[in-house]
Image: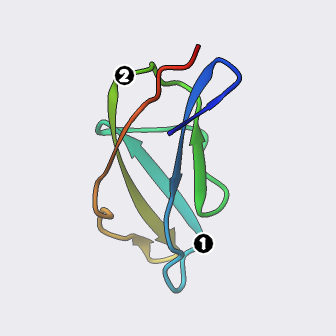
Amino acid sequence: AYCNDTKSKIRVTWNQPANAISYKIFKNGSELSPAPNGTTYIDEDVTGGMVYRYKVKASNSTGDSGDSDEKEETAKSCT
């Protein structure tokens, strides 16, 4: 989690598994849209001091992977 001026943001990153074509990212159980276009997602829809939980699925022509390990982040309070 970090601040950009007075805006709190959370950067979620993951390793690219073999054969991954695209990704789905989930925040507190809900899929985010648009899907990330690589192995980094910047979440700008966060509130300082709140805890968020993220999971990622990789996708390819045969379907989706299982969920990644959950990553928990607390958004910074920016002033």
State the residue lying farthest toward the bottom.
Answer: 18
Q: Secondary structure at mark 1?
A: loop
Q: Secondary structure at mark 2?
A: loop
Cα distance between the residues tagged 2 and 1: 34 Å
In the picture, the disc for residue 21 is 1
State the residue lying farthest toward the top.
Answer: 79
Label 2 vs 1, first from the N-terminus: 1
Q: In this picture, is 73 found above or below 61?
A: above
- Which colour style is shown? rainbow
Q: Nearer the viewer, residue 39 or 8?
A: 8
Q: Which residue appears at 41% of the width and 62% of the height? A: 57
State the residue lying farthest toward the right.
Answer: 5
The residue that disc 2 covers is 49
Locate residue 14 relative to residue 49 in the image: left or right: right
Q: Residues within 10 Å of mark 2 (few under 14, many from 20)?
A: few
Q: Quadrant of residue 63?
A: bottom left
Q: Which residue appears at 43% of the width and 30% of the height? A: 75
Three-letter code, disc 1 = Ile
Q: Nearer the viewer, mark 2 or mark 1?
A: 2
Q: Dividing the image into 4 quarters, which one contains the C terminus?
A: top right
Q: Residues within 10 Å of mark 1 (few under 14, many from 20)?
A: few
What percent of the width, then of the height, locates residue 52?
A: 34, 35
Residue 47 seen in render? yes
What percent of the width, then of the height, locates residue 19?
A: 54, 84
What percent of the width, then of the height, locates residue 48?
A: 44, 20
Locate residue 76 relative to residue 30 in the image: left or right: right
Three-letter code, disc 2 = Gly
Q: In this picture, is 60 found above or below 46?
A: below
Q: Nearer the viewer, residue 41 or 8?
A: 8
Residue 35 seen in render? no
Q: Nearer the viewer, residue 8 or 38?
A: 8
